Image (cartoon, helix red, strand yellow):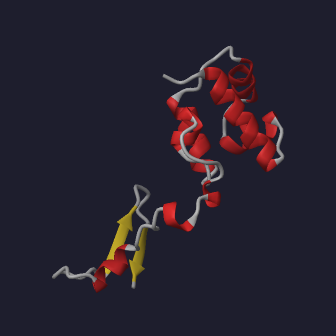
Amino acid sequence: MINSKDFTDRLKKMMEHYQISASMFADKVGVQRSSISHILSGRNKPSLDFVLKVTAEFKDVDIKWLLNGIGVFPITEVSAENSIAPTPSIFDLENSSHIKKIQRIVVFYADGTFDEYQK
């Protein structure tokens, strides 16, 4: 269970780190300003949607740190030994021992357009 007081302290730490106000934080995350106000005051608990929006917007915020205080903030301060290797590109799989090789990927959109990705 999330400790609301600790969660709000971590949100405040984020805002201090990025030097932004609560209203700027709300705009950046894409939520109503009153939502941030209610969470910071302890009136409301954060929703999963809110937490996911925060971690999507602020890439150096680990969800475990935001929810439970586990880990460090920002993630970029993690030492090289403890950092997670970046996910390889799907095209990097070509150098692995897989038999089938990816030549291209085509993404079709509902509006009839498409994007094509080739190595």
Seen in the picture, residue 92 relative to 17 is either above or below; the reply is: below
Give the residue at x 67% y 42%: 29
Identity of the residue furthest to the top in this view: 43
Residue 104 placement, left or right of 42: left
Res 83 seen here: no
- At 64% across and 50% down in the image, what residue appears? 58
- Residue at (40%, 55%) from the top-left corner? 110
Residue 44 picture location, percent across and down? 63, 17
Q: Nearer the viewer, residue 102 or 6?
A: 6
Say which quarter of the image contains residue 113: bottom left
Which image quadrant: the C terminus? bottom left
Q: Is residue 55 left or right of residue 36?
A: left
Total marks drawn? Answer: 0
Return the x and y of residue 60 as percentages of the image width and height.
62, 54
Q: Looking at the image, which is closer to me, 111 or 93?
A: 93
Reply above or below: 118 against 41: below
Residue 40, x across and y down, in percent: 73, 24
Coordinates of residue 86 in the picture (x, y in percent): 46, 67
Horizontal arrangement in the rendering, residue 40 relative to residue 7 (left or right):
right
Q: Is 108 above or below relative to 27?
A: below
Say which quarter of the image contains residue 96.
bottom left
Query: Does 97 appear above or below 61?
Result: below
Q: Which picture quadrant has residue 4?
A: top right
User: In the visual, does 111 lie left or right of 11?
Assistant: left
Q: Residue at x 57, y 48 (%)?
A: 56
